[in-house]
Amino acid sequence: QVQLVESGGGLVQAGGSLRLSCAASGLTFTNYHMGWFRRAPGKEREFVAAISRGGSTTDYADSVKGRFTISRDNAKNTVYLQMYSLKPEDTAVYYCAAALLYIGRDSGRYNHWGQGTQATVSS
């Protein structure tokens, strides 16, 4: 079955960085656009970033643009989210998701989801 497994979360001070990874299995990775979403305590899940199948197209939420970078390694079936200049408001559970026919910000159009990894930014 399809599995998306996130890793790389942790506790970091404001201004620091983290690199999240999402390893995919059970699917043909190059057929899928990939996205990162997050859910902060008491808030709804929100879009963070997306990347196309081949990696040539990316999209970012305004709140992370210029600080986060999404990338993928199709040889390793893995998508990454490099996060710099972290702020306390970036504290959330981060989820990766795969979409067969869609690249964008609508979480409802993603087909598969990981379990999430916690990133906590202290002030």
Image (cartoon, grey):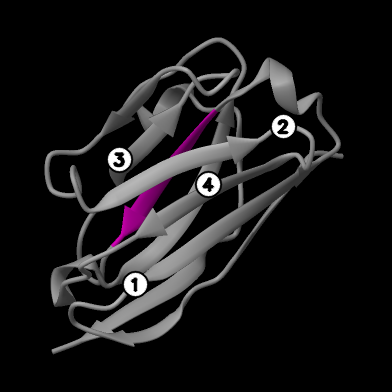
Residue at position x 59%, y 57% from top?
21
Direction from residue 26 to residue 86 in the image, left or right: left
Q: What's the amino acid at mark 1?
A: Ser
The residue sitting at 31% across, 44% down in the picture is: 48
Q: Position of residue 41 (x, y in %)?
A: 25, 72
The residue at which mark 4 appears reads as 96
Q: Secondary structure at mark 4?
A: strand
- The quarter of the picture where the C terminus appears is bottom left
Left or right placement of residue 49 versus residue 86 in this view: right
Q: Would you place residue 101 above or below residue 99 in this image?
A: above
Q: Which residue is mark 2?
A: 74
Find numbered disc 2 in the image and state the secondary structure of the residue it sits on: loop
Of the image marks 3 and 1, the number of the one nearer the N terminus: 1
Secondary structure beneath label 1 = loop
| Amino acid type at mark 2 | Asn
Mark 3 or 2: the one toward you: 2
Question: In the rendered structure, are the residues bearing label 2 and label 1 in contact, judged by CB atoms less than 8 Å apart?
Answer: no
Q: Could you say which disc has been placed on residue 47 in the image?
A: 3
